[in-house]
Image (cartoon, rainbow, N blue to C red):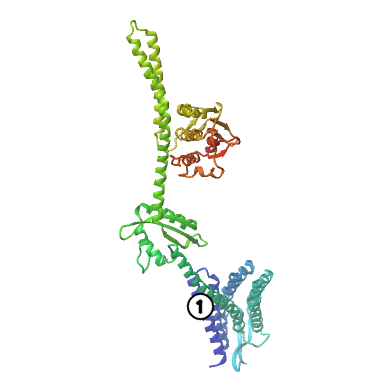
Amino acid sequence: MSYVTILWSGSAAAALLLGLVHGLVWLNDRDARANLAFAFAGLGLAGAAITELGMLSASGPDEWGRWVWWTHWPLYLNVIAMAIFLRLYLRAGRLWLLVTLIVARTVVLLVNSFSTPNVNFARIDAVKQIPFLGEPVTVMSNAVMGDFQWFALITSIIYPLFILDVVVTLWRRKTRESHRQALVVGGPVLVAVVLSVVLSQLALWQVVRLPTLLIPPFLISLAAMAFELSRDTVRASRLARDLRISERRLQLAADAAGAGLWEWNARNGRIWATEQTRRILGLPPDGDIHPEGLWRIADPADARLISAALDRALSNGGEHAMQFRIVTPDGATRWIAAHGMVDLDPQRNPKRSRGVVRDVTQQRLAEDETNELRRNLLHVGRVTTLGQLSSALAHELSQPLSAIQHNIETAQLLLRRDPVDLRELTEIVDDVLRDDRRAAEVVQRLRAWLKQGRLQSESIRLVDLVNDVLAIVHSDAVFKHVTIECAVPSNLPPVLGDRVHLSQVLLNLVMNALEAIAAADVQRRHIRIEAEDREDGLCEVAVSDSGPGIRTAKIDQVFEPFFTSKTDGMGIGLSISRKIMESHGGRLWAENGTHGGATFRFTVPTQVSRLAQRA
């Protein structure tokens, strides 16, 4: 076998092997479009090597011309694929130059398809053999150039111009990596293409008696690109090793956190999951996982929620999170928290999704218990407040009931007289009716306190709210010798809130002030309730007392649940009061007065500001 046959056949085999390898790379990663372009370049070069070997061994002009005709097909594939590879891999080269090259080469290929013997020659009169690599090879000796050979020549010049633009673009980026690519990839490819174009055109125009020799220079360019891609292969191998190490670390961290990893490939529908994921979801320890199997373990009550969340995630991409229930094979219900990310392709179609799952059943049970405890604490707080209220109501009811009893006893004495004084008896009856109405109002306020439910917002005048509370605590204040001063203007704008809850807060603050004064040995026993309209759309109410005040370190702590300074207190009144004010859109805080005592302040939105917010 001759050296020419060995070299050109070996070149074809090497190019074909490189093309197949990088074609497989693309099949495993459809985003590796540069590898696909390189695969086509390798296939084109393999075909060109075969056709050029046919030209070198042709026995006559007609056979040589046919091989030239066939050479245009693999050469077209190689040139276009190499240009696209440079554009994709190096991200350099003007797009309009690439498009011009593709259009020009396509025109040449189409004209060649309808030309005889080919686009380069109108006719080939004679060929001859010359020695090459120690053996005779066939070259063209006499021919007439075709009418489109000038266009083929221009097309051959566009290709090195595009590569030169790629090299210049890389060099202008002024980075070490771009300079390396310009020298290692762009430079050899440019030299090889220029050499190939010059040699082939000199042979076609019969300037020199040489074979066209497309393959040797093109092998140089293919080797330069293969070397660059091999660096990526080595880097990918190193990254794969690091990835395996990172995967083991991530697996260890996920197992320690009780989380399972999963990944879904949208192209083939396969789901990968770790052993921890399978245990959490109650799936078999081995075997394929299908989406239908996951739907079967989902709780039917959450099926619609899961479907809607998945549709949004697959449509919008990015991160997504949800919690849902599953039913295990033994019939138990588990709460699962899933967090993942969906990758979309350029057409906004889902490509893959990956994430983690955790069993949060115990966490959900703890949250439910906490919520139930919070509801119970709110109820206990109301009951505690009712206990405070009952003491005040006992004093309040004792006055009208005592007056009624006194008037009834007086009426009995008057009825024993003869004659009966009807005018005085009528006055006594009027007094009884008045005291009865007063007692009924007290009872009515108690019934309002017994209501338990959601906030029922209504327009409230603060002066009326304060007067209602003062009427409740009046007897208790008199009994403890405490003076309560009301400094609430009657022209304040009405506030919007739940009357019962706001009364509960104000009553709690006043009762705390009464108890603080009663427990302290102070001469001045005084409580002041005042209110003002602020510029931020809130009304501020302040309850100040002349008691001992609050220790500076305890000012914020008094609002914590179960913190109390009373011997018989539960420590939840102020905590609940703060929650109530926050639910109204206001806040509650405490401070010490400049002249002693403590001041509790709370804010509540005015009706005008709340309506403005809704508008």
Q: Tell me: 222 left or right of 451.
A: right
Q: Tell me: 418 left or right of 210.
A: left
Using the image, determine if residue 522 lies above or below residue 15.
above
Asked which secondary structure carries label 1, the reply is helix
Using the image, determine if residue 92 lies above or below residue 66.
above
Residue ranking furthest to the bottom: 134
> Residue 132, how many percent across, how many down?
61, 91
Residue 59 in view in this figure: no
Using the image, determine if residue 231 lies above or below residue 583.
below
Residue ranking furthest to the front: 521
> Residue 475, how many percent across, how many down?
45, 26
Residue 276 in view in this figure: yes
Observer-nearest residue: 255 or 93?
A: 255
Q: Residue at x 42, y 60 (%)?
A: 358
Observer-nearest residue: 376 or 209?
A: 376
Which residue has dot 1 on it?
21
Residue ranking furthest to the left: 330
Observer-nearest residue: 121 or 508?
A: 508
Report which quarter residue 73 is drawn in: bottom right
Report which quarter residue 101 is drawn in: bottom right
Q: Residue at x 41, y 33 (%)?
A: 449
- Disc tally is 1
> Residue 227, how many percent across, how many down?
58, 79
> Residue 512, how many percent across, how many down?
49, 35
Q: Amino acid at mark 1?
A: Val
Badge 1: few (under 14), some or many (20 or more) residues near its Cα, within 10 Å? Answer: some
